[in-house]
Image (tube, helix red, strand yellow):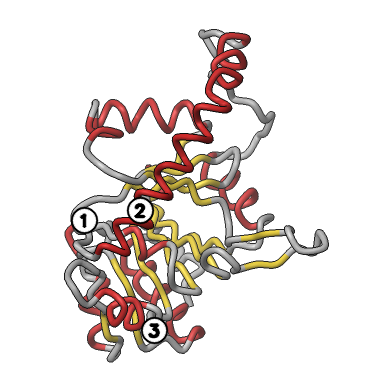
Amino acid sequence: MSHDPAMQDARHQMLARIRTGLSATGEQLRRQADAFPPPHGRGPFVATDLACVEQFRAELSALHAQVHLCAGPAAALVQIEHILEELGARTALAWDAAHLPLPETLERLARRGIRLIDPQVAGHNRPARYVELERAEVGITGVDIAVAESGSMIVLSGAGRPRLASLLPPAHIALLPAERIVRTLPQAFDRLRAEHGEALFGARSNLVIITGPSRTADIELSLTLGVHGPRQVHAVVICPPQPSSQGDAP
């Protein structure tokens, strides 16, 4: 928590507005929840003959994201380098190597001369830190689970998993093992609860569901990408190696 009195005052005002809003809408939300008691549908909710990986690619691609199916870790690493080259990126925000499905990614970035920016903003020099963080050209994260029906990727924050990596840079590269793609949203949360238990929500401050680039149509109903988050989203799907295939990696 900041020790800056102005920052604390702004925080208290923001929390007060949230509490006021919840007190005004809480009863309505409870009535709506009571109108649809469990058990809820488990899906699948969309009829398809596609396998999960192909359905995920079709759904996410339709939302202006780029999905790269890679035949094995080596092909995925080459694909990451190709994306970085296309972006012309020289700086990056990233999860710690231990939290990435391809830990060697950061070493490869260093060899290409890409500078990793420290994501920490704690301390008394926050304005300068924010200026530094804004220079990040690409964010690199893992994906904890993905939903084929909606093309969504679920990302859990925590130590070594800075939230800003998937939010602040104009381009986001998400590393997704193919076996982490399930058909429906209920299946995704079933697996996360089985793996994390109560810590899924109790031990972290943030859980993000990413379904394509940031988009808004608030202004004259004109769709604009990249206003509130990354304009480009690249999902690098790490499929099992295929001895007779080189995947779609360049």
Residue at the spot 38% in from the left edge and 76% down from the top edge:
78
Residue placed under numbered mark 3 in the picture: 135
Asked which secondary structure carries label 2, the reply is: helix
User: In the rendered image of this protein, does residue 46 appear above or below residue 92?
Assistant: above
User: Residue 229 at what x, y percent from top left?
Assistant: 52, 64
Residue at the spot 46% in from the left edge and 36% down from the top edge:
182
Residue at the spot 20% in from the left edge and 64% down from the top edge:
97
Q: Earlier in the sequence, mark 2 or mark 1?
A: 1
Q: Are marks 2 and 1 in contact (CB under 8 Å)?
A: yes
Nearer to us of marks 2 and 1 is 2
User: In the rendered image of this protein, does residue 215 appear above or below residue 203?
Assistant: below
Asked whether, in this view, residue 84 is left or right of residue 100, the answer is: right
Nearer to us of marks 1 and 3 is 1
Residue 1: numbered disc: 1
Question: Of residues 88 and 207, which is closer to you in this image?
Answer: 207
User: In the rendered image of this protein, does residue 217 appear above or below residue 109?
Assistant: above
Residue 11: numbered disc: 2
